[in-house]
Image (cartoon, coloured by chain):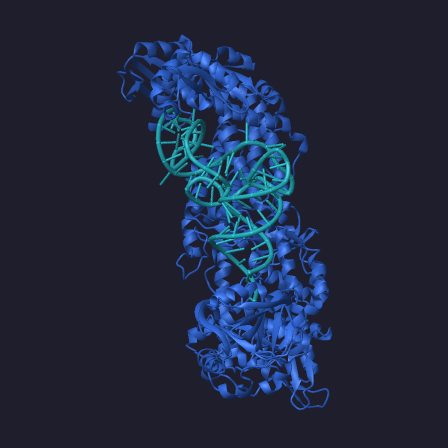
Amino acid sequence: MSKVKVADRLSQIQYNQFKIEEEVKEFWARNRVYNLIRDKSNASNRKFYFLDGPPYASAKSIHIGTIWNKVIKDIVLRYHRMRGFNVWDKPGYDTHGLPIEVKIEQSLGLKVKKDIYEKVGVEKFIEACRGFVNENMEAMSKQFIEIGVFMDWENPYVTYTNDYIESGWWLIKKAYEKGLLYKGYKVLHWCPRCETVLADYEVSEYRELEDPSVYVKFPVRGRHREYLLVWTTTPWTLPANTFIMAHPDLEYVRVMVNDEILILAKSRLEDVMREANIRDYKVIDVFRGSILEGLEYEHPLEDYVDAQRELSNYHRVIMAPEGVSAYEGTGLVHSAPGHGTVDYDVAVKHGIPVVSLVDEVGRMTRESGKYHGLYFRDEANKAILEDLRARNAIFHESTIVHRYPVCWRCKTPLALRATTQWFISVSKLKELLIREANKIEWVPEWAKTRFMNMLEEIRDWAIGRQRFWGIPLPIWVCKSCSYTHVVGSTRELVEMGGEVPEDLHRPWIDRVKLKCPNCGGVMERVLDVLDVWFDSGISFYASLGYPMRRDLYENLEPADFIVEGHDQIRGWFFSLLRSGIIGFNKSPYRRVLVHGFALDEFGREMHKSLGNYVEFDELIAKVPRDVVRFWLATNTIWEDLKFSWRALEYTARDFTVIWNTFVFASTYMSLDGFDPEVTTIENTIDSMEIEDKWLISRTNSLIRDYHEAMSNLKIHDATRLLKAFILDDVSRFYIRLIRRRVWEERDTPSKRAAYATLYYALKTWLILAAPIIPFLTEYIYQNFFKISESNTPASIHLLDLPESNTKLIDLTLEEHMSIARSIVETILSARAAAGLKLRRPVRRVIIAAKKDKVGEAVKKLSEVVAEMVNSKTIELQGLEFFEKLRVYTIKPNIGEIGRDYKKLTPEIVRLVEERGVEIADNIIKKGYYEAIISGESVKLEPRHIEIIAEYPEWLSVKESDLALVAVDKQLTREEEAEGYSKEVIRRIQFMRKEAKLMIEDRIAVWLDGDKEIMDAIKMYEDYVAGEVRATKIIYGTPTESGVYVKEWDIEDKSIRIGIRRE
RNA sequence: GGGCCCGUAGCUCAGCCUGGUAGAGCGCCCGGCUGAUAACCGGGAGGUCGGGGGUUCGAAUCCCCCCGGGCCCA
């Protein structure tokens, strides 16, 4: 590879980040850079198994949150590759499930479930789902690639493939073998219009609905006029009432109201009576809830409901703290196990039957007797309330508006309803789940708390759905003897006498009949498909082809790293662990990072329906990819992100400074023929100035802190460090400091040292930034560093990240420099207060340190400070220097005095002016000053006066917590003259630029005008000529042609300047 | 109703774990620079640290309660 020292390509490029990114993208594609990186990574024997949480392939345009998610993944993967790991980076897609079915139903114009069978047929429906998903995956991958995500896009894992389905069957079989698979009758949300059970995650929409709010009296068996008082908003569930729940530790009361005795919780008594508008009631006794255990009652509508003939055997009070609230209702809870989740759990626990009296279309069943055929909410409620009223079973009734779940597709209010489903008994695995979850490293730590809280409430898992587009449940049942067999693989299918269809989906798999090993009869598949959460939960082994091939999984497991949003704590993180425990008795991952949610600028969710959704294409068209990535990476990773176009715009501005920093380096290094392989920080160390050593130290501190942040997954900290380093330390500080050294015409050791230092710092930064902003770093690498060195790899992403050389870190120097920079700020503030332009040199700056360290820093770095504040000298003095010069003056605070002393005010003001020093002295020492004025006693306190410290005219003083600083304003004639010459230089430079001269062009200069300025220039002629690259300075107005002439005013003096290229 | 997270300058956020005089960037105002220039640099104004209570010599930071927002559940 040929090298050309530092060639100045960058400054000839018009900065257009969009174009740069396009070029880089083409460069990567043309040179197959991703494959080169993979080859390098694969050669390592340190494995890093990253498991991609598969995004749901239900739309073409990816959400900002999905971009953030993949960018985080990409940064972590790139980081690990550049640290020499063998990185597994297969992306995935989640492709099954009801949301996709619904989109297809909509696009095919299907209204209800049976339309799928009757109007299009299941085959076409499945093909439509697959086609839809394929299109989405293709579009999504394109966007991920677009934003620079380096993953194995040619080989993603897809949950609908036959291999993946077969892997899924394996786990169901495993659950069966462990005795965890069972068939049960359970309460789940049901849409009576769509005629289907809904998965938990599908119950996500709620509406404000009005319902009855009724207090019902249940007579206590064998007692006269004594009732258990319950509250309900769902009268339609009363026919299915089976028992009443109470809390054993809550206090209850028996209370007398209108000759009747009611039982309810003490904490609810007042509210209930107020609501019922009853003032006249009397508490008879107070007792613990446990006393109520087993108390039997009668159902007010018992005789109307057929089902109650059996249920009435169970009418008693049961202790169930999980179902009772002390803040709502009456503390006694009506329970219908067929229509409530807690009710159901309690019933199962106590061996009580579960009865549902609502059918699949939402009508009351025959079993509900008198109410048979009524629609469950409005019709049934009305009839039941009428009957309760007629029987005087209502204590009080009104209505309530509350949030009620509705079907997310048709908005019909849902019913909780018991149906027969297949379950995996996850609750049996609770202990193991908790033990394994404890071994996982959670970032941030609170995610673990959240996860553990959730495991505490774990329930059995209903795995089946009565739908089509999903992994078919691999359970076959014999038609004659009901023998049940779980199939764990396609091979087993053949062994059982079946044929393997080309596609394992419904309906083809439904046609596979097996031979019953028990009776030889025909076995048919249970028509359910698996809950879509099952799919992604098995990705840790299924994406590796296990168990059909074992080597990959066995070499890679467990996953070293996974990362998703905090909604996935209960989602994917849990479903993975669940599958891990079922299949392998252990956690499938060891480290989790949780990121936030992408919200809009007001902190609301971004949704197409809210109109605040940002399309990927729009984003990429408006903002360069690296800017998006960098901005995303700056956000504290586990906190929510507020999207903002403005914030992106500001980030884009930072990028122009970054770019200019590299252009500056490239321009001057090339101009001077700097060769980074000849001139290095090692061999220029003797010529280094203190700022060079400082920057080298800072660079190594940056490397150290960057690795620290990255290895703790604090990507935002690493990103902020990079940003501060390049913008603050390099661009705004170091480069400004070395400008003078760099402008030197001759080849000096000092200049070489500065170049070596700058080159080293910039190259280090560029490599560290590569995982975060891969496009720009690649471009600068190609056009600056790569062409300046030999034996460089084809892409920056093939480099290893630098390690920190702690020997080069000088923390004392860094601290001193940071003190000096702070002192510089204070001095500049003093200059500004005195109206002294920075261009004007001052004779001296005096600094009195308040701390030892400040003194040390100023002493060590006085040259740097002098340069930064443009002062000839820096003088270090003790604090007493300022004390001696300081005089205090006093000013009356007329507002305060007037408020306190009214008419006396003018006299007090006069007194303060006359005896200022004495008063100030008293107030400083004693805190007050007393006097008698017009016979009245006056006490002046600090609030009455203002004490001002004043310094002599010729000093401008400022104070900070580190030091007192003073700028000496006095100027000698030489300094005046130097000031003027700088003014003239500035104007000549401006004219050079207007005349479009190159930096290295020489000129002749003509000067005419104000005598004082002419004298000044004569005094500094060599200096002026050097600064503007003039071969000669001629005093007078040019008569020659081709001279560019311009009139100027400097303060109140005017001059004429002419320049011409020589 | 429960669990977890967030609430600090006009805006976006650091600081909180491990208490010690409130920080940055942007925006705004003022000034400067013009050899990185569709840039850049400096200065300034701007804050009851969501509210209340507690612990402490001392609380943005630790504890409790409340309010507002987010996520996940009921």
Give the residue displayed 55% in from the left and 73% down from the top: A230
Quadrant position of residue B37: top left
Q: Tell me: residue A833, above or below residue A60.
A: above
On the image, which quarter does residue A310 sit in?
bottom right
> Chain B is which colour?
cyan
Residue A570 lies left or right of residue A665; in this view the side is right
For the point 48% across and 18% down, which residue is it?
A923
Return the x and y of residue A21 as percentages of the image width and height. 47, 47
In this rendering, the answer to whether A628 lies above or below A1050 is below
Nearest to the observer: residue B34 or residue A608:
A608
Where residue A758 sits, quadrant-wise, is: top right
Res. A897 in view: yes
Q: Please provide percent x and percent y for residue A667.
A: 47, 31
Residue A651's x, y, as percent? 46, 42
Tally of numbered discs:
0
Q: Which chain is blue?
A: A
User: On the rendered structure, is A913 left or right of A200?
Assistant: left
Q: Tell me residue A145's x, y (percent).
A: 51, 55
- At x 44%, y 35%, the residue is A11
Image quarter in which the C terminus of chain A is found: top left
- Quadrant where the N terminus of chain A lies? top right
